[in-house]
């Protein structure tokens, strides 16, 4: 048994506690940013046609489940998902630019590189099990 009296926390322990306090503050900020981003995303989805909203909602579910590292936000007024502040993937409703097709696309932050040429955007007209499986594979590859 030691009779030595403790002088309190060591400098190393104090530094570690300060680091943890910064981490908790950052986590709280990130959590709030994620919640705000999701709120904005769902507001944009609510303004879409029912078909577009169904696709965007399902995309969000797939991203949240299979690429939880990505945070929701809006980008050019459309749903997007980011990592470290950079857009990885996005959904563009056909009605946004009076187009005939919805688009699910990827930006530079996605790691989809495959040789000298690869697709970065996909026409997305309906969610089927096969389409969902392809999206999940792309999400997993884009967030490696």
Image (cartoon, helix red, strand yellow):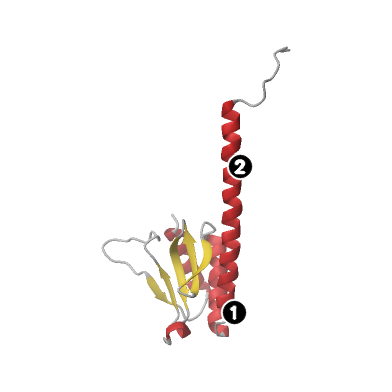
**Camera-nearest residue between 111 and 82:** 82
Q: Which residue is drawn at 43% across and 59% down?
A: 141
- Which residue is labeled 1 in the image? 46
Q: Which x, y percent locates residue 140?
A: 46, 59
Q: Real-space Cα distance between discs 1 and 2?
A: 37 Å
Q: Residues within 10 Å of mark 2 (few under 14, many from 20)?
A: few
Asked where in the image residue 10 lies, by quadrant, the reply is top right
Q: Is residue 7 above or below residue 52?
A: above
**Camera-nearest residue between 108 and 15:** 15
Instruction: Determine the secondary structure under disc 2.
Output: helix
- Which residue is labeled 2 in the image? 21
Q: Which residue is drawn at 64% across and 27% down?
A: 9
Q: Which x, y percent locates residue 1?
A: 73, 12
Compared across the picture, whether 54 is left or right of 125 comes to: right
Instruction: Determine the secondary structure under disc 1.
Output: helix
Q: Which of marks 1 and 2 is nearer the N terminus?
A: 2
Q: In this view, does 37 lie above or below 102?
A: above
Asked where in the image residue 100 lies, by quadrant, the reply is bottom left
């Amino acid at each position: 048994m030691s009779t030595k009296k403790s002088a309190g926390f060591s400098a190393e322990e104090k530094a570690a506690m300060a680091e943890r306090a910064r981490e908790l503050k950052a986590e709280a900020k990130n959590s709030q940013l994620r919640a705000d981003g999701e709120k904005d995303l769902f507001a944009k989805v609510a303004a879409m046609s029912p078909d577009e909203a169904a696709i965007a909602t399902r995309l969000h579910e797939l991203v949240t489940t299979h690429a939880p590292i990505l945070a929701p936000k809006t980008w050019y007024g459309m749903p997007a998902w980011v990592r470290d502040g950079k857009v990885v993937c996005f959904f563009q409703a056909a009605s946004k630019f009076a187009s005939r097709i919805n688009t699910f696309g990827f930006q530079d932050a996605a790691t989809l590189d495959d040789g000298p040429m690869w697709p970065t955007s996909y026409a997305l007209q309906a969610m089927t099990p096969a389409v969902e499986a392809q999206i999940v594979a792309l999400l997993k590859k884009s967030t490696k």
